[in-house]
């Protein structure tokens, strides 16, 4: 195998691991931010479009719209968690395989595995946040008065 092919494979592997790491760490938080950034203004406008609050939302399908946004963001958070978990498992298998085959182990001092675990924890935390926000959206009427 030529040196050029090795270099291309190493670059592809690096970009794959970088994208998996970033998606695992930041995917679920971004999904939660998107959920909050979409649901709050849509519900606010539907219930308070002008100077006087409404007793019912402008759109009858508002709860359905909010539920769809919540489900899409939950799916994004779960996908991010799956990517982080898969990446963590892959880094563990590659280390075990290298030890069994007495190959040269690429030393990154555990940084890759640590970042994968950080992605798992981040995804778990923000999936819970997405679930709590979804419960609030589904259980509380958007145009109800705070009493």
Image: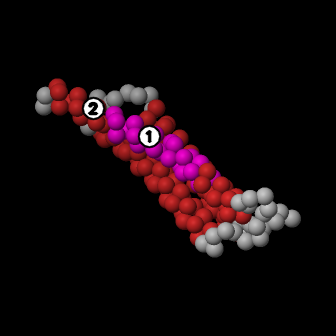
Q: Which residue is drawn at 34% across and 40% down?
A: 16
Provide the residue designation for mark 1.
Answer: 21
Find residue 54 and report its image quarter. bottom right
- Tell me where residue 141 appears, x and y as whole percent: 72, 69
Q: Residue at x 26, y 37 (%)?
A: 101
Q: Is residue 92 left or right of residue 131?
A: left
Q: Is residue 75 left or right of residue 98?
A: right
CA neighbours of label 1 inside 10 A, class few (<14), some (14 to 19), many (20+): many
Of helix, strand and loop, which mostly describes the magenta segment?
Answer: helix
Callout 1 secondary element:
helix
- Tell me where residue 99 appears, x and y as whole percent: 32, 36
Is 56 in front, or is 13? Answer: 56
Which disc, if any, is residue 10?
2
Q: In this view, does 4 lie to the left or right of 25?
A: left
Callout 2 secondary element:
helix
Residue 124 appears anywhere in the view = no
Q: Give the range drawn in magenta.
A: 14-36
Q: Are marks 2 and 1 in contact (CB under 8 Å)?
A: no
* Measured Cα–Cα span from mark 2 to mark 1: 16 Å
Residue 11 appears anywhere in the view = yes
The question of residue 124 being in magenta is answered with no
- Tell me where residue 76 appears, x and y as whole percent: 49, 55
Q: Which of marks 2 and 1 is nearer the N terminus?
A: 2
Find residue 122 and report its image quarter. top right
Q: How many numbered discs, if any?
A: 2
Q: Residue at x 53, y 57 (%)?
A: 73
């Amino acid at each position: 195998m030529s040196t050029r092919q090795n270099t291309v494979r190493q670059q592809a592997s690096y970009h794959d691991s970088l994208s998996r790491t970033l998606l695992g760490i930041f995917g679920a938080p971004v999904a939660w931010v998107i959920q909050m950034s979409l649901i709050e203004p849509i519900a606010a406008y539907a219930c308070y479009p002008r100077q006087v609050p409404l007793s019912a939302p402008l759109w009858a399908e508002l709860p359905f719209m909010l539920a769809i946004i919540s489900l899409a963001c939950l799916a994004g958070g779960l996908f991010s968690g799956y990517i982080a978990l898969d990446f963590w498992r892959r880094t563990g298998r590659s280390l075990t395989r290298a030890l069994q085959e007495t190959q040269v182990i690429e030393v990154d001092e555990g940084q890759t595995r640590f970042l994968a675990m950080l992605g798992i924890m981040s995804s778990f935390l923000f999936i819970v946040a997405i679930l709590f926000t979804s419960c609030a959206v589904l259980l509380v009427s958007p145009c109800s008065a705070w009493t």
